[in-house]
Structures are given as C-alpha cells and as structure tokens.
Image: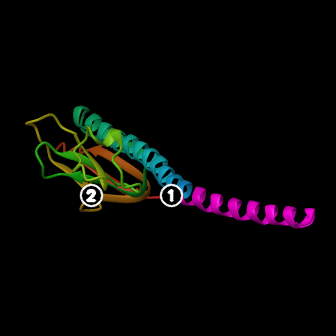
Amino acid sequence: LKSGRGARGQATVEFILTLVIALLIITAIILPSYDNSSNYVVDVSNLAKLRVSSDKLADAVQYAYVSGRGTRQTIEVAIPQNATITCNTVSVPATITMKYGLLSKQSIPSCLVDDDPNDGQSCMKKIGVFPAPSSPTFSCAPAPGVYSQGLYLMSVQKSSVDGTVSVAGTKIG
C-alpha cells in the first residue's frame, strides 16, 4: 500500500501536468484569435479615420469648385498607417481616391460597398469631386498628389485668375 503522502504527491504532479497541457491548448487557440481580432479593430478604426479625411478633402474641393474665384479653405487631414489619399486630376470626372491596406487580411463589411478588388488585402474608394461631365482644371501639389501616413494641412483654393481648383498638402506630423 502507498502511504497517504505519496498518493497526494502523485495527485499534485498529475494536476500540474494537466494544468500545463490545458494552458498550452488554450494559448494555442486564444492567442491567434486575439491577434487577429485586435488587427481587425485597428483596421476598422483606421478606415474610419481615412474615410473622414477623404470626405473632408473632397468636400473642400467641391466647395471651392462651386464658390467664387479666390475662394480658399484650409483643412487638417489625418492619414493612418498603411493608407494613402490620391488626387486623380486626369480622370473625368476628377476624383479623390483613398486606399487602405488591411492588417487583418480579412474583408471588412464597409469595404464591400466600395471600389475594392475584394481580395481581403485592401480597401479603396473613389470620390468624384466635380459633377460629370464637367471637369475644370484641377491640380494637387506636391505632384503627383499622393499623400501617405501623417497629418497634413491641406489648402484648397480656386484661382482668382482662371478658376483652377488646386490642392496643396503640407505634412505637419
């Protein structure tokens, strides 16, 4: 017969081994899910910031377009990591395009209604800034009008001479 101390010692060792195996299984299941869900939350947050910035810029361009010559508006635009805002000055009608590279590599429902390639890698949206078929002269500086991660001061103005609408972005952060 085993003594009472030996049986309690064996039970303790078995309990510790069972606990270690259970923790390994839980860790193998929960950690990847946690990482993926945290990337998803970052994607949704960054995409919301990018949409607000893109819409704000497009609205400023549209306001300058419909306003009188000499109109000037300065706005602040925040572009998150893995994102760009591009002025498409040669397309008719001209557009502001936002593009965001997804960290979670999964489709986000709000991306499905945009101009996305539906590859789960990126989210893209084009915003027309002038009514079709109208396409006044439109320019963005610094050329080629691609703004990446950072905080920008965007000056949108309509020329008092020829009515050209221009966007000039200065990175401030």
Q: Residue at x 27, y 38 (%)?
A: 64
Q: Residue at x 33, y 47 (%)?
A: 107
Residue holding disc 1: 32
98 sits to left or right of 34: left
Q: Residue at x 31, y 36 (%)?
A: 59
Q: CA distance from mark 1 to mark 2?
A: 38 Å
Main SS of residues in magenta:
helix
Q: Nearer the viewer, residue 24 or 1?
A: 1
At label 2, which amino acid type do we have? Gly
Q: Secondary structure at mark 2?
A: loop
Q: Which residues are magenta?
A: 1-28
Q: Nearer the viewer, residue 4 or 130?
A: 4
Residue holding disc 2: 145
62 sits to left or right of 133: right
Q: Is residue 94 magenta?
A: no
* Figure coloring: rainbow
Q: Residue at x 50, y 58 (%)?
A: 32
At label 1, which amino acid type do we have? Pro
Reply above or below: 41 against 171: above
Which residue extends farthest front?
Answer: 1
Quadrant in which the N terminus is drawn: bottom right
